[in-house]
Image: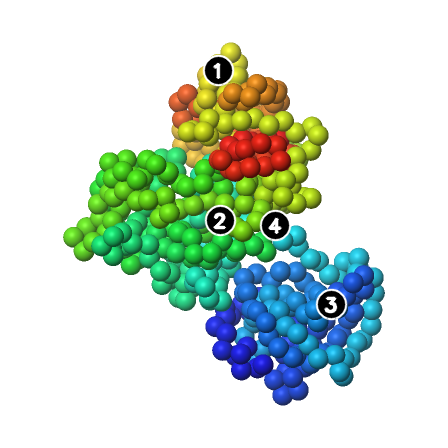
Amino acid sequence: MLTRMGLVIACLLAAWSAEAGDTYNATTGLINIPAVVVGSTVYTDVAVSLAQVLAVDQGLPYGTCDSYDLTTNQLTIPAVQVGTVSYSNVLVTVNLQGLKVGGSLPAANSICQTPVRNQLPLTVDAGPAAVISAGSAEVNIPYVSVTVCQPGTTICQPIDHVLVDTGSTGLRIIASVLEPALTGLPPVTDGSGNGLAECVVFASNVSWGAVRTADVQLGGETARAIPIQVIGDGAFPPPPASCANQGPVQDTVVAFGANGVLGVSTFVQDCGDGCTNAATSLYYTCPPAGCQPVGVPLTQQLPNPVSQLNEDNNGVVLALPAIPLSGAVSANGTLTLGIGTQSNNSLGNNTTIYDLDMNQGNFTTVYNGQIFSDAAFLDSGSNGLYFADNRIAACSNTGPAAGFYCPSSTLLLSATNQGYSNGSIGSINFAVANAEALFSLTNDAAFSTLAGTPIPGMFDWGLPFFFGRQVFTAFERSPTPWGYGPYVAY
């Protein structure tokens, strides 16, 4: 049994070792367990003999306590230390002869925290370590952790501070974040074996990088062998002029404000039919002579990773608490996978569904007499509410508040949202505060009153909209108990 464990190639994660996880003694064959859940009881300080290793999934440890199934004699271990190596999410069978138990207590005790399989903790804070070190703290950015693996292996790396974006599709990771074992993810290639790259515009900035294949773990679920983008991949040439000329290239953690982006919009592919034609494609083929635009089939485009799960794959629910109008240091919520697939992702009785334009993913907002027809959207990746209103004073054109509104006092405003075609209608009350005053609160990273000027003709309901709400995003052509996507609901 030790031999099989020893042969598994795993990530060395010192942070796991520092926690009170299991340890395996190769000499005695014993697993020493701080706490294990059996039925309605938690047993503490347990020692049990290992019989057989059934699986090692890796990724972030799924839970804080072992769990034991009396029927199958299977022990699930979130994290176990074997010598100097930490393994995670291990499934074994055990030999109960010689079992030692130190004590017991009710399973409801907080000593054991078992995360929900289809849910990821979400945090709005000042950003990843590299951003903080550079003195450029972020505001209103929702982050989760994802785990990226070499396809079909246990060579994995958890990556924290990945931006959750309901306004884009696909997983994109900054190359400098990846450990050496993950820098050689298999490339996605064209028919001639040339690697593919992608040029994506976020607002006025460009992200350029290779398209590679990875297994992606979200919570307790895995999307296997899917295309992802590695931004700033040093194995590929720099962006060609046709890409770089579209705006400043963001290929570092500090420039991007995140270690990556998890795009979970209503679209299943990040580009769709438009990228099957080279003339309108975001994708490039990169032979030695240089990178040129190329049409690629849907199967080679970046997919919405949630849509590629075996279950809970028809949408997501982003939930954040309400925060004071003056802001908060941080905010903690959840990203739940699936809609109507589990008890934790059902639409409530007071939830309204707004169907979306199948092509644009938009609905209609009416604000201050302006009708943003088929030009409004919910976008957790935008750090403010963005809409045009020349009655509201703009901030200075220089400094961190440039592009935001700076009214002399907090404004209480309202708008009306309408579904694209299903007749749903509902009023939204919101507030706009002085961005310069908000940013002077140097420790705060979460603001529900941050707003600015938009792309002309659009109404962007950014992250401030999400505070105090559960927001459902149903994927295109995906069935839910409340009809097919695309739709948003709140």
Identify the amino acid type marked 2.
Gln
Percent of width and height locating residue 397? 40, 29
Cα gap from disc 1 to disc 2, whole angstroms = 36 Å
Contact flag, marks 1 and 2 (Cβ < 8 Å): no
Name the mark nearer the viewer: 4 or 3: 3
Say whether marks 3 and 1 touch (CB < 8 Å): no
Q: Residue at x 66, y 67 (%)?
A: 76
Marked residue nearer the N-terminal end (4 or 3): 3
Pointer 4 or 1: first along the chain: 4
Residue at (39% x, 66% y) in the render: 180
Q: Nearer the viewer, residue 351 or 245?
A: 351
Q: Which residue is mark 1?
A: 371
Instruction: Between residue 167 and residue 281, name the one nearer to us.
Output: 281
How many C-alpha atoms fall within 10 Å of the one at disc 1: few (<14), some, or many (≥20)? some
**N-terminal label among 4 and 2:** 4
**As drawn, 249 above or below 471:** below
* Mark sitting on residue 404: none
Q: Position of residue 455 (x, y in %)?
A: 40, 26
Q: Residue beneath label 4, please?
A: 118
In three-dimensional space, the C-alpha distance between marks 3 and 2, rounded to whole angstroms, equals: 31 Å
Three-letter amino acid code at the position of disc 4: Asn
Which residue was labeled with disc 3? 71
Q: Please name the residue that numbered disc 2 is placed on.
A: 308
Mark 2: give few (<14), some (14-19) or many (20+) Cα within 10 Å: some
Specify whether 39 is left or right of 395.
Answer: right
Calculate the distance from the C-alpha at mark 3 to the C-alpha at mark 1. Answer: 61 Å
Secondary structure under the numbered disc 1 in the rendered image: strand
Instruction: Work out whether residue 176 can be spotted.
Output: yes
Disc 3, SS: loop
